[in-house]
Amino acid sequence: MHGPTSHNYFSQRLRLHYVDWGNEDAPPLLLIHGGRDHCRNWDWVAERLRDRYHVIAPDLRGHGGSEIGEGPALMPKHASDIAHVLDAAGVGKAAFVGCSIGGYILFEFWRRFRARFTALALCDTRPQSDTAEARANRLKTADTVLEHGTEPFIETMIPKLMGRTTVSARPDLVAGARVMMRKMSAEDISLVLRGMAERPDSVADLKTINVPTLIVIGEEDVLSTVADGELMRQNIAGSQLKVIPKAGHYAPWEQREAVGTALRQFLDDVVLR
């Protein structure tokens, strides 16, 4: 497997990192990872797509090789970062795939830059904002991780992020997820959580999405459930819902072949038709 080319882009003195699998004459495809991992989570999926698409994957601020910046990592900041990465890569319009927080960011990106979309895939995400209770818990966790460090947070998140099948049968994937999460500092995690707690509700925006859309949900996802996927399918005209067996919130990491195949079939149909 040939790895991608690594790039650093500086926006207002903030370092943003992204990787690029080349094939610049092909249709652009941007892969946005989930919370607490980084762009190389997409390596296996990208290898399934790179022959037909110009695949680009950024590290979100506070993740991987991208700096966190000042203050909470709010959705408008993330959306602006994605626009800057596209500009740095010389890409105008693209197909977008967003997992978990990547989906939250794409809802914001849609509100601000919808003319840049050719297609959309939403993976293990949900359009609703946090309830008052969930927001309070997220903010409490943001404080706790600063006080007690990242390891207790990581261990608490593993059974939420990984499906029960993965936790019981694939210790290698669980260990790999821990490695990804350990790249984030306590400050990174805290500011990302605070930004997630402040995200707006995007349910009303679903009916405005008018590009081909695929929704992918891990069957065992307890954070973005199949019911959340069905809500999006019902409100995004013409969208498709694909449920991935034996996968949780990290479906592209847990069931790489199934997610890669679903994305390939969808993109080939709507982008290359």
Image: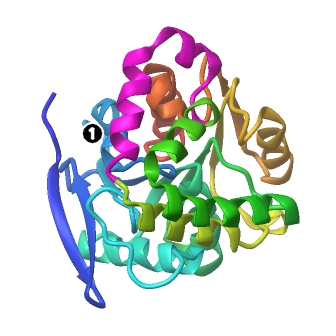
Residue positioned 25% across, 88% down in the render: 13
Q: Please name the residue that numbered disc 1 is placed on.
A: 50
* Quadrant holding the N terminus: top left
Q: Is residue 42 visible?
A: no
Q: Nearer the viewer, residue 268 or 106?
A: 106
Residue positioned 48% across, 61% down in the render: 189
Q: Is residue 15 left or right of residue 190?
A: left
Residue positioned 50% across, 55% down in the render: 148
228 lies above or below 190? above
Label 1 environment density (alpha carbons within 10 Å; few <14, some 14–19, many ≥20): many
Q: Is residue 76 left or right of residue 261?
A: right
Q: Quadrant of residue 207?
A: bottom right
Which residue extends farthest bottom? 12
Q: Quadrant of residue 25?
A: bottom left
Q: Is residue 7 visible?
A: yes
Q: Look at the numbered disc 1 and give the secondary structure of its residue.
A: loop
Residue positioned 58% across, 74% down in the render: 75
Specify the principal SS of the magenta part: helix
Q: Position of residue 23 (x, y in %)?
A: 19, 48
170 inside magenta stretch: yes
33 inside magenta stretch: no
157 lies above or below 85? above
Q: Position of residue 220 (x, y in %)?
A: 69, 24
Which residue type does callout 1 highlight? Arg
Magenta range is: 161-183
Q: Position of residue 204 (x, y in %)?
A: 85, 68
91 lies above or below 98? below
Q: How many marks?
A: 1
